[in-house]
Image (spheres, rainbow, N blue to C red):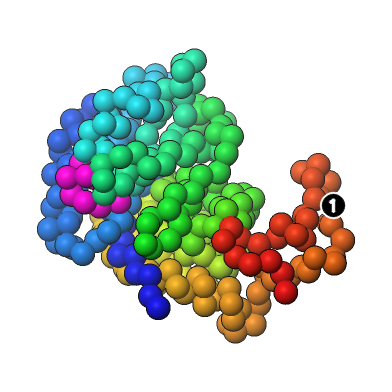
Amino acid sequence: MSRPLPVALVQAPPRPATAPLSGFAEEVEELLARFPGTALVVYPELHLCGVDGPRASVEEQLRAAAEPLHGRRTAELARLAGDLGIWLVPGSVCERGEGGELYNTALAFSPEGRLAASYRKVFPWRPHEPYVPGDRFVVVDLPGTGRVGFAICYDAWFPEVARHLAWMGAEVIVNPVMTTTADRAQELVLARANAIVNQVFVVSVNTAGPLGTGRSLVVDPEGRIRAEAPGQGPAVLTDVLDLDDVTRVRTFGTAGLNRMWDQFTDTDAPVELPLYGGRIDPRRWRPAGRPGPR
């Protein structure tokens, strides 16, 4: 059995927030002409909402670029995905909430031309980002292929995000990033660690220079780097992920050994988690869609 997912990660500079989406549509069309078998296209964080100038004006620019979730921008992007027959993650966008809140929101559009999922960044990079945190984790099913979860940039530094996405059945974590700072090296370690401890694929696509530090990558469920952009320049990473690798690793273990999702049995006592005011319930410790402990 094989569940292939051909992906293209576009490491590129952000487009100005004022630029028409027609230019972005042309870019995606050109990409697919070069890589015609691609099923999932992913861009960096805030790729369509690039701003410039003094820090004091950034929030003002972001607010000017913000649109309601179901606004004109979303309709145009949905139409683009439908016209091209692909799954499209155009990075994240500035979403204006009903009360004027500003969210950093990842969007996923289906080949049928609909908004299939939206995820608001749960962990904005404070104090530098003006966004209101999201309040839920999000996964989306790609029919006939598998389940994808979303984590935006700084979310990757919080293991609770990747763990919950894997528990919700995600086999791939899509991580759009706009890292402009010196900690991209640490993020590469986190991408591998999140893949290893949750036995999932991680695809992390960063903004290109001169603003971003690049080094986008694809990591398999055992933490091996399958593809990586060597620097900060514009690049396209292509790969074909076999989501049955997730099933294999979870069945036989990482390196044929470790099966963390089979750690507990129904007879084990719950483990208290004082930090969260909650607990690990052994009867719930397994990803969605998997059988219970043996």
The residue stretch that appears in magenta: 80-88
Q: Residue furthest right?
A: 269
For the N terminus, which image quadrant? bottom left
| Amino acid at circle 1 | Glu
Q: Residue at x 38, y 28 (%)?
A: 69
The correct choice, above or below, for 105 with respect to 12 in the image is: above
**Residue 226 in picture, x, y percent from top left:** 39, 72
Q: Dot 1: what SS? A: strand
**Residue 15 in picture, x, y percent from top left:** 25, 37
Q: Is residue 44 magenta?
A: no
Q: Residue at x 13, y 52 (%)?
A: 30
The correct choice, above or below, for 223 with respect to 121 in the image is: below
The correct choice, above or below, for 62 with respect to 167 in the image is: above
Question: Viewer-proximal residue, 56 or 256?
Answer: 256
The answer to whether residue 259 of the structure is visible from this angle is yes
Q: Is residue 95 left or right of residue 273?
A: left
The correct choice, above or below, for 28 with respect to 171 in the image is: above
Per the image, the residue denoted by label 1 is 272
Q: Is residue 84 magenta?
A: yes
**Residue 18 in picture, x, y percent from top left:** 23, 26
For the C terminus, which image quadrant? bottom right
